[in-house]
Amino acid sequence: MSALRLDRHFRRSKVPDITVGFWTLKLLTTAMGEATSDYAVHHANPELVVLVGAAAFAVALWLQLRSPRFLAATYWFAVAMVGVFGTMCADVVHVALGVPYAVSTGAFALVLAAVFVTWDRVERTLSIHTIVTTRRELFYWAAVVGTFALGTAAGDLVAFALGLGFVRAASLFLVLFATPGLAFATTRRHPVGAFWSAYVLTRPLGASVADWLGFPRRVGGAGLGHGTVALVTSALIALGVLVAARAQRRHP
């Protein structure tokens, strides 16, 4: 094996290990993205907000791609910005362009499927433990953006278009989110499919909880306000990333 192949073989993946902490932070970023997007769009110029969100996402992704190894702060900053910008994109498709939730959900599902098919044909694997090259990392982030857009549209479809409301939508997505993990724990089969299925479902689950907490009581929410939810979830994310970074320093 050549030196380059040996280096690539033993290089650590640039994404974190899948632990309870990972899923906790992932759900927090989805909730934060939903609340931040809703607050910003309704309290500032929507076009300007989307441009700022796009710029922040570009900076975060650039920092992640140029990093030679996994860094908790850099990685979760990128995920958080995907959460904010991905939510804005899905909302613009519905609000500004008038595309029904059912249509946008189907379209985003096709886009995400195309990303996975292309990724698999080029790299022959969709495992996150193999994110050790720039090309694979680009495929990974394309899939992440797709899961956020699809999850946002699917969550709004269930909560608003189908009329389930925030609490029942969150309960439904919680069951769906847990199902792939339980299936894998029972059968030990199809780990990659189980991971990406659960990953997609974190978006509508976190967004449904954030919507319930943020929206007024008259529409079925808890009435805390989107700004409050955004601040609290951001603080929790910062705390979680600090814990992850310290753990990384102890066990590099």
Image: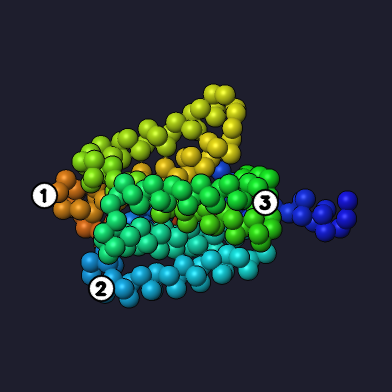
How packed mark 2 is, by other alpha carbons closer than 10 Å (few <14, some 14-19, many 20 or more), is few
Q: Counting residues from the N terminus, which is met first, the one under dot 3 or under dot 1? A: 3
How packed mark 3 is, by other alpha carbons closer than 10 Å (few <14, some 14-19, many 20 or more), is few
Q: Is residue 57 above or below residue 6?
A: below
The picture places residue 204, in percent across and down from the top left corner, at 36, 46
Give the alpha-carbon distance from disc 1 to disc 2, as whole Å.
23 Å
Assign a secondary structure to mark 2. Answer: loop
For image coordinates 57% across by 69% down, the residue present is 63
Residue farthest toward the left in the current orientation of the protein:
218
Residue 42's image quarter? bottom left
How packed mark 1 is, by other alpha carbons closer than 10 Å (few <14, some 14-19, many 20 or more), is few
Give the alpha-carbon distance from disc 3 to disc 1, as whole Å.
50 Å
Label 3 or label 2, whichever lies nearer to me, is: 3
The picture places residue 116, in percent across and down from the top left corner, at 56, 48
The picture places residue 156, in percent across and down from the top left corner, at 29, 48
Assign a secondary structure to mark 3. Answer: helix
Q: Counting residues from the N terminus, which is met first, the one under dot 3 or under dot 2? A: 2
The picture places residue 62, in percent across and down from the top left corner, at 56, 69
For image coordinates 47% across by 40% down, the residue present is 198
Q: Residue 21 vs residue 104: left or right?
A: right
For image coordinates 80% across by 56% down, the residue present is 7
Q: Is residue 163 visible?
A: yes
Q: Residue 156 vs residue 86: left or right?
A: left
Q: Is residue 211 above or below residue 86?
A: above
Amino acid under label 1? Answer: Arg
Pointer 2 residue: 44
Q: Counting residues from the N terminus, which is met first, the one under dot 1 or under dot 2? A: 2
Amino acid under label 3? Answer: Val
Is disc 3 in contact with disc 1, using a CB cutoff of under 8 Å?
no
Q: Please tell me which residue lies in front, 46 or 129.
A: 46
Marking on residue 218: 1
